[in-house]
Image (cartoon, grey):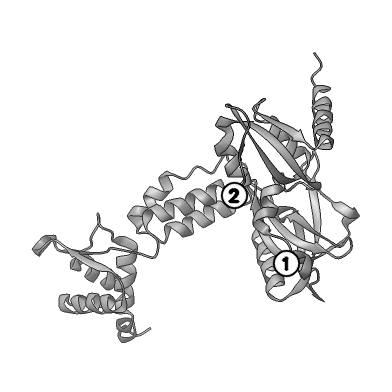
Amino acid sequence: MARSSFQKLKILYVMDYLLKNSDEEHPVSVAQLIAHLDSHGISAERKSIYDDIECLREYGLDILQTGTGKTNGYYVSSRDFELPELKLLVDSVQCSKFITHKKTVSLIKKIGELASVHEAKLLNRQVHVQNRIKTMNESIYYNVDEIHRGIAENKKIRFHYFEYNVQKERRFRKDGAWYLISPYALSWDDENYYLVGYDSEIGKIKHFRVDKMADIGITDEARDGSDSYAALDMAVYARKTFGMFTGEETQVKLRFENDMVGVVLDRLGRDVMLIPDGPEHFTVRTDVVVSPQFFAWIFGFAGKARILEPQSVVNAMQEQLKIVSENYPI
């Protein structure tokens, strides 16, 4: 490229350098900007730098000046993402179990590029990824993209669904047959990503862990089950389905000690009605999908929670406790 052509890129190089190298604690001088431009074959005078900075301000870049004389410098004061927001994004990525180690490192690096090089170092100091439990399925990001595309195009998707054996090898369900599902939503629950869709074969809404889906593809067949999905409140669905385990939906009456209020509100929502039951307890009525995961939630309160009704669910809890106790004979 001719030197004159490089000159046309001058203001872009100035903006790029300011975004990558400046912040409130690290303003850059005009001399630094001139040296940066010179390294790219672009000549510049001080006055032209001042003009470029003013143009960038007019464009909308929040550039502030600090100091005077030899201590004079410029820095980008505000960005699309502030440092605390970037830290929050980094925390979310590194804590997400469904994102693999490889993709976690890649995403955090990209997040760091939204800050100055100096602030990016602060982000790197808070990264603790190596020993976190992560999915082994590298294709999950493409799975999510295909699911969203199926939803947008109103088409069914097909996929293979698998689980791991003790050798950590995939074992496909249904003997490797295709699942054909009308996709409607993606839901986050218990650190996992789930597809919520309609299974025409059995005529009901089902959910599938996205990281256990393989070979996803969009079909030419239009989605069905829209009425079933329209009748589904996703927030309520996630609240009453513990760990996304399937089971029979039942209204239950539960009794808790008073210091469990916060935990109950976190799980069942702030709209749930709390009924005082003596000076030290309260009861709630709520719809839940009765499953081993629901019983585990109750058991985790170590006697501070109890199922009162219906008797069928009480009996099922007793059966679960019996099964567990048989593994630990006294």
Looking at the image, the residue that sits furthest to the top is 330
Residue designated by label 1: 230
Residue 44 visible in image: no
Give the x, y percent position of residue 231. 74, 64
- When the figure is inspected, residue 102 is found, relative to residue 232, above or below; the finding is above
Residue bearing mark 2: 271
Q: Nearer the viewer, residue 162 or 169?
A: 162
Q: Residue 9 in the image: state x and y as whole percent.
A: 33, 80
Of badges 2 and 1, nearer the viewer stands: 2
N-terminal of the two: label 2 or label 1?
A: 1
Residue 112 shown left or right of residue 9 in the figure: right
- Tag 2's secondary structure? loop
Name the residue at 33% across, 81% down: 6
**Labels 2 & 1 near each other (Cβ < 8 A):** no
Kind of residue at badge 2 = Asp
Secondary structure, mark 1, is helix
Sort mark 1 into few (<14), some (14-19) or many (20+) by Cα contacts within 10 Å. Answer: few
Residue type beneath disc 1: Ala
Q: Is residue 180 above or below residue 288?
A: below
- Dot 2, how many residues are within 10 Å of its Cα: few (below 14), some (14-19), or many (20+)? few
Q: Residue at x 78, y 42 (%)?
A: 290
Quadrant where the N terminus lies?
bottom left
